[in-house]
C-alpha cells in the first residue's frame, strides 16, 4: 500500500521571463498547485523550496519563506533545498518522507530558477572545486561520457541527434516547453559545436521557470480525488570510487535498481518515463541504467523509435530538458508535473494512451567522475 | 604549445603538482596516500574516506593514457584558451583515473588510448584575471 499521494501540481511555461522575479514565478506555480488540489493554504503543514543558483547569481538566500508567504503559507516549517539539478526532486523527496513518517498530512514542494542572465557561460559544479578550476563544465562532463560510449559501443552522432529530434517532436504538443519547433537530424548536426560531440541543439537550453507539487497522506487523498500514488522516491549520492566507468554509471544503475525494488516493479511495467536529458548522451545512458535496453544499445533504442510517443516505452514526452528548457531548481518538479498530467490522462496531443505507471529520473552535479545526486520518483494510478 | 612555467605565477590549487623550476625535475602530480590502508587519492583528502586514516602527500607520477577527451569550443571558463581540451587520464603508476586539462596546442592529435605526459604552465586565470599555473597532459613525443 502506498503511503503518500500527489494531489495537486502547478507549473508556469518555461522560457525567458526577464520581467518576473524568482518569487513571482514560484508563487504562481504554488498557487496553481493549491487550486489544482483544492487545498487551502492553512492545510499545508510544511514547505520545501528548491533553488540551485539564486545565491550565486543574485545573492539571494532563504527564498522559500518569501514564496510560501505569498500563497498564504506561514508559521509552518519551511526548508530551502539546494541539490544542483536534483534540487526540486529532492524537495519532493523530503516532502514524501515527511508524510511517510507520519509527521504531516499535507506538504508542498516548490522549485524555481532564473537562468536567463547575461554572460552566464557554461554551468559548473561549484567554483572552488578542483575539477571546475581545471576546466570542467557540465557539457564537458557528459561529452566525456559520449566519447566513451561512441568508442566502446559505436554510438553515432546521428543517434545522439535523434534524441533531440524526438524531444522536439514531443515538445510541439507541450505548451509549457520553451522550444516547440521540430528539427531534423541534419539541423541538429549542423548547429554550432559547443563541446565535442555536442552541437548547441544537443545541449539543454537555460530557462526561467517554476513548478510545484502538493503531497498528502492517502487518507486525505481519498477525499480529494484525482490523486496519483507515489510508489517510490529515491535519492542516491555517488560512490566516488576510482576509477569511474563513464558509461556503466554505477550510481545511475543503483538508483534505478533501488526505485524498482521499492516500487515492486521492473522496467517492463513502465508506461511513461521522464529522464535527465541535459545532453543527448545522458538520455541514452539513462535508458541503459533503467533497463529499457541492454548496455550499449541506447543509441539503437532511440534510432528505432522505441522511446518516441507511440513507441514501446515513450521517454520525455514533455520534450525533456532539451526542449522544455532547464531551470535546475525547477526541473525535477516539472518532471512530476508531466507524469501527474500523463497519469491523469490530461496531456492532450502528447498523451501516452492508458498510462498507469510513470518514472522520473534526474541527476545533479559532478564529483570525481560521478554524480553528486540522483533521484528517481515512481508514480502510479 | 610551449608554456613556460615560472616561479612568479602561483598554482591554481596548492598541493596538486610539484612546483617549478622544472629544468632539473619535470613536473609530477601530487596526491594523497593513506598511511593505514595505502589507498591513493587525487586530490589528497584530509582523511582516507575508506578507513579514516590520515593521509600523507604522495607523488602520483606524470604519465598516463587518455581514457576520454573532449574539446570545449565555446566560452571555456576561467580564461582558458578557446578552444581548450579536457579529459580523463588513466595514470600509469597509481592506476587512478583523473580529470585534467589537455594541451590546447595538440587538440588535433587527441584520441582515446593516446599516451600522454604531464606538463604545467600558465593556463587561464583565477576567476579574477590573475594568471595561474595549471597542469595539463600533452601527447608523448617519440623520443619520450
Image: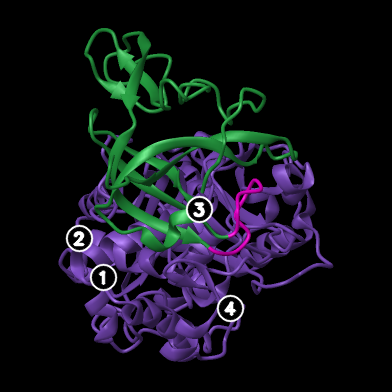
Chain colours: A purple, B green
Residue A18 relative to residue B51: left or right: right
Quick one: which residue is furthest to the left in this view? Answer: A294
The chain to which mark 1 is attached is A
Magenta region, mostly helix, strand or loop? Answer: loop
The residue indicated by pointer 1 is A270
- The boundaries of the magenta stretch are B73-82
Give the Cα distance between marks 2 and 1. 8 Å
Determine whether label 4 and label 1 are within 8 Å by CB.
Answer: no
Closest to the observer, B57 or A14: B57
Query: Which mark is first along the chain, 4 or 2?
Result: 4
Question: Given this view, does label 1 or label 3 mark the residue nearer the observer?
Answer: 3
The local secondary structure at tag 1 comes to loop
What residue does disc 4 label? A177
Which residue is label 2 attached to?
A: A265
CA gap, disc 3 to disc 4? Answer: 38 Å
Q: Residue at x 32, y 79 (%)?
A: A159
Going from the N terminus, do you reach mark 4 or mark 1 first?
A: 4
The dot on residue B104 is 3
Q: CA distance from mark 3 to mark 2?
A: 48 Å
- Quadrant where the C terminus of chain A sits is bottom left
Q: Chain of mark 3?
A: B
Amino acid at each position: 500500500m502506498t503511503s503518500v499521494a500527489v494531489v495537486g501540481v502547478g507549473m508556469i511555461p518555461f522560457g525567458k521571463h526577464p520581467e518576473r522575479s524568482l518569487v513571482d514565478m514560484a508563487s504562481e506555480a504554488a498557487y496553481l498547485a493549491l487550486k489544482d488540489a483544492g487545498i487551502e493554504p492553512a492545510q499545508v503543514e510544511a514547505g520545501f523550496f528548491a533553488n540551485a543558483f539564486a545565491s550565486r547569481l543574485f545573492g539571494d538566500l532563504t527564498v522559500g519563506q518569501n514564496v510560501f508567504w505569498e500563497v498564504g503559507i506561514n508559521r509552518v516549517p519551511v526548508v530551502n533545498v539546494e541539490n544542483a539539478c536534483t534540487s526540486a526532486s529532492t524537495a519532493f523527496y523530503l516532502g514524501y518522507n515527511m508524510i511517510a513518517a507520519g509527521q504531516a498530512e499535507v506538504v508542498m514542494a516548490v522549485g524555481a530558477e532564473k537562468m536567463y542572465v547575461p554572460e552566464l557561460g557554461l554551468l559548473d559544479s561549484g567554483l572552488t572545486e578542483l575539477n571546475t578550476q581545471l576546466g570542467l563544465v557540465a557539457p564537458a562532463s557528459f561529452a566525456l561520457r559520449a566519447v566513451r560510449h561512441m568508442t566502446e559501443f559505436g554510438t553515432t552522432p546521428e543517434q545522439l541527434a535523434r534524441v533531440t529530434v524526438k524531444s522536439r517532436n514531443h515538445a510541439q504538443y507541450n505548451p509549457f516547453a520553451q522550444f516547440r519547433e521540430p528539427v531534423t537530424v541534419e539541423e541538429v548536426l549542423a548547429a554550432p559545436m559547443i563541446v565535442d560531440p555536442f552541437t548547441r541543439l544537443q545541449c539543454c537550453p537555460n530557462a526561467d521557470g517554476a513548478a510545484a507539487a502538493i503531497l498528502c497522506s492517502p487518507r486525505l487523498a481519498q477525499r480529494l480525488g484525482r490523486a496519483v500514488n507515489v510508489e517510490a522516491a529515491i535519492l542516491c549520492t555517488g560512490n566516488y570510487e576510482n576509477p569511474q566507468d563513464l558509461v556503466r554509471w554505477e550510481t545511475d544503475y543503483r538508483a534505478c535498481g533501488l526505485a524498482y525494488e521499492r516500487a515492486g516493479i521492473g522496467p517492463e511495467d513502465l508506461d511513461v518515463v521522464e529522464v535527465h536529458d541535459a545532453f543527448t548522451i545522458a538520455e541514452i545512458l539513462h535508458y541503459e541504467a533503467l533497463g529499457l535496453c541492454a548496455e550499449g544499445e541506447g543509441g539503437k533504442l532511440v534510432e528505432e523509435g522505441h522511446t518516441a510517443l507511440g513507441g514501446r516505452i515513450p521517454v520525455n514526452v514533455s520534450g525533456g530538458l532539451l526542449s522544455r528548457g532547464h531551470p535546475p531548481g525547477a526541473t525535477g518538479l516539472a518532471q512530476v508535473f508531466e507524469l501527474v498530467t500523463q497519469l491523469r490522462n490530461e496531456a492532450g496531443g502528447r498523451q501516452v494512451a492508458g498510462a498507469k505507471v510513470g518514472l522520473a529520473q534526474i541527476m545533479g552535479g559532478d564529483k570525481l567522475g560521478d554524480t553528486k545526486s540522483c533521484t528517481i520518483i515512481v508514480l502510479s494510478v | 604549445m610551449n608554456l613556460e612555467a615560472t616561479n612568479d605565477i602561483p598554482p591554481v590549487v596548492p598541493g596538486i603538482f610539484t612546483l617549478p623550476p622544472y629544468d632539473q625535475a619535470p613536473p609530477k602530480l601530487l596526491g594523497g596516500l593513506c598511511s593505514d590502508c595505502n589507498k591513493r587519492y587525487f586530490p589528497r583528502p584530509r582523511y582516507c574516506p575508506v578507513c579514516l586514516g590520515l593521509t600523507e602527500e604522495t607523488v602520483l607520477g606524470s604519465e598516463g593514457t587518455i581514457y576520454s577527451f573532449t574539446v570545449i569550443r565555446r566560452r571555456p571558463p576561467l580564461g582558458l584558451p578557446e578552444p581548450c581540451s579536457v579529459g580523463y587520464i588513466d595514470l600509469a603508476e597509481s592506476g587512478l583515473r583523473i580529470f585534467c586539462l589537455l594541451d590546447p596546442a595538440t587538440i588535433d592529435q587527441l584520441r582515446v588510448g593516446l599516451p600522454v605526459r604531464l606538463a604545467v604552465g600558465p593556463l587561464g586565470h583565477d576567476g579574477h584575471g590573475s594568471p595561474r599555473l595549471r597542469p595539463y597532459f600533452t601527447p608523448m613525443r617519440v623520443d619520450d
